[in-house]
Image: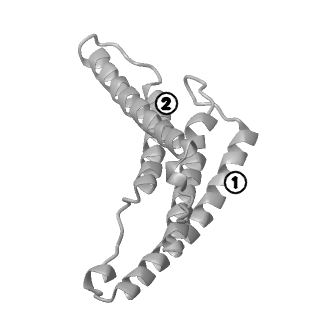
Amino acid sequence: METKSFDLRETLFWTILHHIIVILMVVGSVASTACMVYSVILRYVFKGNFYGSDEVIMLFAFWLYFMGAAYGSFEDSHIKADLLSVYLKNMHLKDACTILSEFLTVAVNTIVLSWATRFFFSEIAKWGLSTSLKIPLIIPKSSIFFGFLLMEFYHVYYLQRHLRM
């Protein structure tokens, strides 16, 4: 009797996490674009000013950028300088290079995640506010921590998946 191995990609958790990332990217994209269009129309058509537009755009752009990075990790489609796999003919050597590359990605991302974690907690402690609209800076800056956390999650998943193959 064949037993099916557990695959995290087939769980409700994986699906919900994917949908949350997509929703945050769509909201960030639409909202930042809408703010820019509104600002341009207000300035050049109605000769007005959208006070604090840069702060609102920053809020959505940060989340868009880091959720986009997490989505690239989800798809395992980040840009890679993987020229060796093009020239290598031996499949075992190609697999070893892939695993080494994924291990290095996890290692570097772990270091950056530790920096992002310290940054996140220092921002919570400071609780800074934006200059004009008094938006808590933890809102856009928390995207850095959560983006790298999600990237680490996906990179570790793909590394362990390739190690089991």
**Would you say the residues marked 2 and 1 are in contact, meaning their CB atoms lie under 8 Å apart?**
no
Asked whether, in this view, residue 131 is left or right of residue 58, the answer is: right
Instruction: Identify the image's colour scheme: rainbow, by chain, secondary structure or one colour.
Output: one colour
Q: How many marks?
A: 2
Asked whether, in this view, residue 154 is left or right of residue 121, the answer is: left
Q: Is 42 situated above or below 142?
A: above
The answer for how far apart the CA atoms under marks 2 and 1 are is 23 Å
Q: Is 156 situated above or below 141?
A: below
* Depth check, front residue: 120 or 128: 120
- SS for tag 2? helix
Please rate how many residues cluster around mark 1, counting C-alpha atoms within 10 Å: few if below 14, some from 14 to 19, many from 20.
Answer: few
Quadrant of the image for the N terminus?
bottom right
Where residue 47 sits, quadrant-wise, is: top left
Q: Residue furthest right?
A: 125
In the image, what residue occupies the spot 34% across and 24% down?
A: 34
Residue 29 on image: x %, y %: 37, 33
* Depth check, front residue: 24 or 98: 98
Residue 140 on image: x %, y %: 55, 37
In the image, what residue occupies the spot 59% across and 34% down?
A: 139
Q: Residue furthest left?
A: 45
Q: Which mark is residue 118?
A: 1
* Depth check, front residue: 53 or 146: 146
Asked whether, in this view, residue 50 is left or right of residue 142, the answer is: left
Please rate how many residues cluster around mark 2, counting C-alpha atoms within 10 Å: few if below 14, some from 14 to 19, many from 20.
Answer: some
Amino acid tagged 2: Glu
Residue 38 on image: x %, y %: 33, 19
Amino acid tagged 1: Arg
Q: Which mark is residue 55?
A: 2
